[in-house]
Image (cartoon, rainbow, N blue to C red):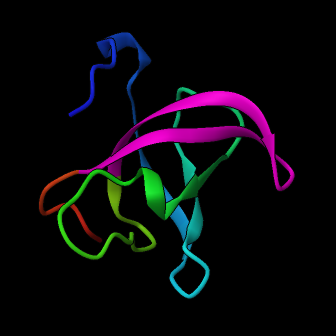
Amino acid sequence: MPEVAPEDVFTGRVLEWHSEEGWGVLGCDALTDEVWAHYSVIHAEGFRELAGGQSVAFSAEQAEQDGYRWRAVCIWPEAGASS
C-alpha cells in the first residue's frame, strides 16, 4: 500500500465499471460527489479491474475528469468483498 494518511482513505463501493475501457465510478458516504476511477490506479496483482457493487478503499483528489469532480489516486480492492 502506498503511503497515504489514514484520514485520506475512503471506503466505498464500485457504482459502475467499464472493463472494455478500463474505467468506472466509485461512491462513498464521505463524499457527496461520485469519483472517477481508472484501472491504472488499482493496487492489485495481475489483471486490474473492478466489479459493480464491489467494496473498495481508495484515496482521491479534487479534479475535473470526464464530468466528475473527484478522481481516484489509489484503489485497494477489499478482500472478498464483491457483491
Quarter residue 53 falls in: bottom left
| Residue 60 at x, y percent in the picture | 54, 32
Which residue is outermost to the left? 80
| Residue 69 at x, y percent in the picture | 78, 37
- Verify whether residue 67 appears in magenta: yes
Q: Is residue 29 above or below residue 47?
A: above
| Residue nearest the observer in this picture, 13 or 44 | 44
The residue under the point 33% across, 19% down is 4
From the viewer's perspective, tell me whether residue 76 is left or right of residue 45: right
* Quadrant where the image shows the C terminus: bottom left
The residue under the point 51% across, 82% down is 19
| Residue 36 at x, y percent in the picture | 65, 51
Q: Is residue 62 above or below residue 25?
A: above
Quarter residue 57 falls in: top left
* Quadrant where the image shows the N terminus: top left
- What is the span of residues highlighted in magenta in the rendered image? 56-77
The residue under the point 45% across, 72% down is 52
| Residue nearest the observer in this picture, 3 or 34 | 3
- Verify whether residue 8 appears in magenta: no
Total marks placed: 0
The residue under the point 56% across, 88% down is 20
From the viewer's perspective, tell me whether residue 43 is left or right of residue 10: left
* Secondary structure mostly seen in the magenta stretch: strand
Which residue is outermost to the right? 67
Q: Is residue 12 above or below residue 3?
A: below
Quarter residue 72 falls in: top right
